[in-house]
């Protein structure tokens, strides 16, 4: 559980190690109160422009 | 990323204007799909401006294994995402493997597809996201995706859902909510400034 939280193992690696499927591993983490999602990344300052760039509708560049 | 080149003709004056439309693609990981399934917001995937894809291995993991073992979230994901025609998310075979060290082969197929298609990764898995950052891939998690598509109040209730299903802790939920609040405030200020500028130019 700690290995997942610290970003040392992915959910799939934890599942493979315990011999369970992805959903079961997800449930194990949940039952152990381990949040799958972390907080903001270190580059949070650039988050809003990045979100706009990633999700805004088709970008047109006129040549 | 698919790049389409369009040629515009303006009336009969034979003036051609070429333009490049960049159509983004998004690669969805199981961790992201499960988070959206928990809070019943899978249909938001429709809002993505480009194609949503996943490697064949993720499809097998979520739909085939998930349905065989009777997981409720798998049923919801299959019903809302993969079974409709056309599906909301297409599963594709990954051709070139990155062979990223320190992750599982299925994790590697996710990152390989993102790199191959110059796409954006949507995932919640902490290490998978770290690895993606490490090799310069653009990645966003569920709260970031929701922050873009939902209004403040709806975003707050979606975060409550993620906390309720213990996918996110309260402290981090509040941080995401604060970022959204600041964003809302900034947008309000920009709108107000634009309104004032218009008023001044009319009066002037």
Image: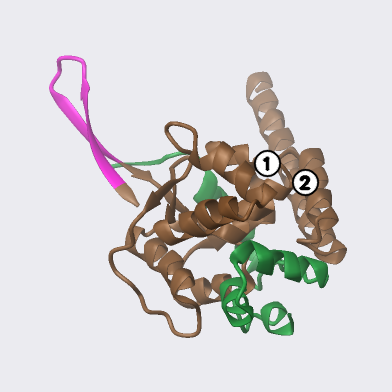
Chain colours: A green, B brown
The image shows residue B198, relative to residue B6, as above or below, that is: above
- Residues indicated by labels 2 and 1 sit on the same polypeptide chain: yes
Residue toward you, B50 or A18 = A18
The image shows residue B183, relative to residue A32, as above or below, that is: above
Q: Residue B42 location in percent, x, y?
A: 62, 42
Question: Does label 2 or label 1 sit earlier along the sequence?
Answer: 1
Q: Residue B178 location in percent, x, y?
A: 81, 55
The residue under the point 70% across, 40% down is B150
- In the rendered image, residue B47 lying in the magenta stretch gets the answer no
Q: Residue B168 location in percent, x, y?
A: 78, 62
Over which residues does the magenta segment extend? B3-20
Cβ–Cβ below 8 Å for labels 2 and 1? Answer: yes
**B167 sits left or right of B67 in the view:** right
In which quadrant is the C terminus of chain A drawn?
top left
Give the labeled residue for mark 1: B41
Kindly identify which numbered label has been placed on residue B61: none
Q: Dot 1 falls on which chain? A: B
Residue toward you, A50 or B145 = B145
The image shows residue A18, relative to residue A36, as above or below, that is: below
* Residue at disc 2, secondary structure: helix
Give the labeled residue for mark 2: B158
- Residue B189: image quadrant is top right
Crowd band around label 2 with a 10 angstrom C-alpha radius: few (<14), some (14–19), many (20+):
many
**B128 sits left or right of B154 in the view:** left
Crowd band around label 1 with a 10 angstrom C-alpha radius: few (<14), some (14–19), many (20+):
few
* Residue at disc 1, secondary structure: loop
The residue under the point 34% across, 58% down is B117
Q: Dot 2 falls on which chain? A: B
The residue under the point 82% across, 39% down is B153
The image shows residue A48, relative to residue B192, as above or below, that is: below
What secondary structure is the magenta-colored segment mainly? Answer: strand
- In the rendered image, residue B19 lying in the magenta stretch gets the answer yes
């Amino acid at each position: 559980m700690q290995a997942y939280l610290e970003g040392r193992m992915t959910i799939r690696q934890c599942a493979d190690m315990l011999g369970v499927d992805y959903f079961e591993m997800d449930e194990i983490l949940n039952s152990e109160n381990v949040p799958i999602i972390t907080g903001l990344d270190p580059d949070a300052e650039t988050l809003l422009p990045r979100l706009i760039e990633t999700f805004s509708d088709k970008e047109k560049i006129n040549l | 990323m698919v790049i389409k080149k369009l040629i515009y003709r303006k009336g009969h004056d034979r003036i051609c204007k070429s333009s490049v439309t960049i159509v983004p693609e998004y690669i969805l990981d199981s961790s992201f799909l499960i988070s959206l399934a928990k809070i019943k917001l899978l249909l938001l995937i429709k809002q993505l401006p480009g194609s949503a894809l996943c490697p064949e291995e993720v499809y097998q993991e979520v739909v085939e294994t998930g349905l065989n073992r009777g997981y409720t979230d798998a049923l919801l994901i299959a019903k809302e995402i993969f079974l409709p025609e056309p599906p909301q998310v297409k599963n594709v075979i990954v051709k070139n493997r990155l062979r990223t060290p320190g992750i599982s082969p299925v994790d590697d197929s996710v990152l390989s597809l993102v790199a191959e298609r110059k796409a954006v990764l949507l995932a919640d898995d902490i290490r998978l996201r770290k690895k993606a950052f490490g090799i310069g891939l653009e990645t966003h998690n569920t709260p970031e995706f929701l922050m873009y598509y939902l209004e403040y109040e709806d975003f707050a209730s979606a975060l409550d859902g993620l906390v309720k299903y213990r996918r996110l802790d309260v402290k981090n939920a509040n941080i995401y909510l604060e970022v959204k609040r600041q964003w809302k405030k900034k947008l309000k200020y920009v709108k107000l400034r634009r309104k004032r500028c218009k008023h001044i130019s009319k009066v002037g």
